Amino acid sequence: MRWHKRWALGMLLLAGGACQAAEYCGDFKGHYGPLDYRMRGQVNLEVVENRHFPQEVEQGLHGSSGELGQDLDYTLRAIPNHHRALVTLTRLALRQKAVKIAHMKFPVECYFERAQRYTPDDGKVHALYGNYLMAVGREADARRAYNLALELEPENATIAYNLGLLTLKAGQYEQAVAFAEKAYGLDFPLPYLKNKLQAAGKWTASNDAAVAAVREAAASAAETKSE
């Protein structure tokens, strides 16, 4: 079986729910933490990062306290929703075309499952999982992950943009336009999605006006929040 057809195997085993997920991907007992990455300054993330996630580990060059996979595994077991470590995990998995990184305890997808199980309200985790799924060609799964991420982070321009790309690729132009309006209204900088919609005849001056309205509403909401 080719590597990219094996990415989904782990999660198929998790379909039975949290108990089976914990059995397959491990619980959070018997390990330092777990700590919430979003709590930096309130919990001591640095005690893990300084030893197990220095720059050379984050860049996927080599390990720090041991093998690269050992340090990344320790980081993600101690801080399951460590956003930067999940990015490193994805980068390594794609580079190695691997479903399991050497010296890591679990298959790649388990670390995303663990992060979601530990902090289900962390929109960034779902977005990072969506990035991973999109990179390995699982677009329907990526779309579900992005939709959940956008529910949790409705003002995230990057998530809206990625959903625009996925719905455009599926030929769902109305949804793609709506996501594009949201993304550009939140000041997403890349014009690719808008250019593709223009080329398909699906973007007009009225859409530019909708972008301006989204931008104005976002600015107003930010001003109200700061008062």
Image (cartoon, rainbow, N blue to C red):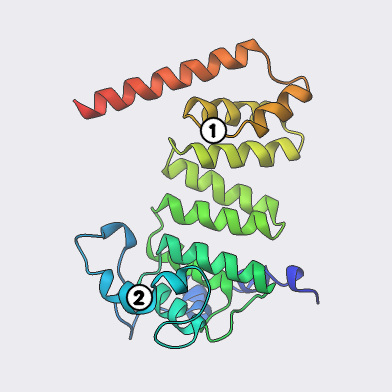
Asked if residue 138 is positioned above or below residue 3 in the image, the reply reads above
41 sits to left or right of 143: left
Asked if residue 185 is positioned above or below residue 209 in the image, the reply reads below
Asked if residue 179 is positioned above or below residue 132 in the image, the reply reads above
Coordinates of residue 49 in the picture (x, y in percent): 33, 72
Residue bearing the label numbered 1: 189
Dot 1 or dot 2: first in sequence order is 2
Which label sits on residue 170? none
Identify which amino acid the numbered label 2 is placed on.
Ala
Residue bearing the label numbered 2: 78
SS of the residue at dot 2?
Answer: helix
Check the image and name the residue furthest to the right: 1
Residue 53 occupies which quadrant of the picture? bottom left
Query: What is the C-alpha distance between the residues marked 1 and 2?
Result: 35 Å
Asked if residue 129 is positioned above or below residue 173 in the image, the reply reads below
Identify which amino acid the numbered label 1 is placed on.
Pro
Packing grade of label 2 (10 A; few <14, some 14-19, many >=20) is: many
SS of the residue at dot 1?
Answer: loop
Q: Residue at x 38, y 60 (%)?
A: 119
Packing grade of label 1 (10 A; few <14, some 14-19, many >=20) is: few
Q: Pick whichever, 10 or 158, lies toward us.
A: 158
Q: Pick whichever, 82 or 113, lies toward us.
A: 82
220 sits to left or right of 2: left
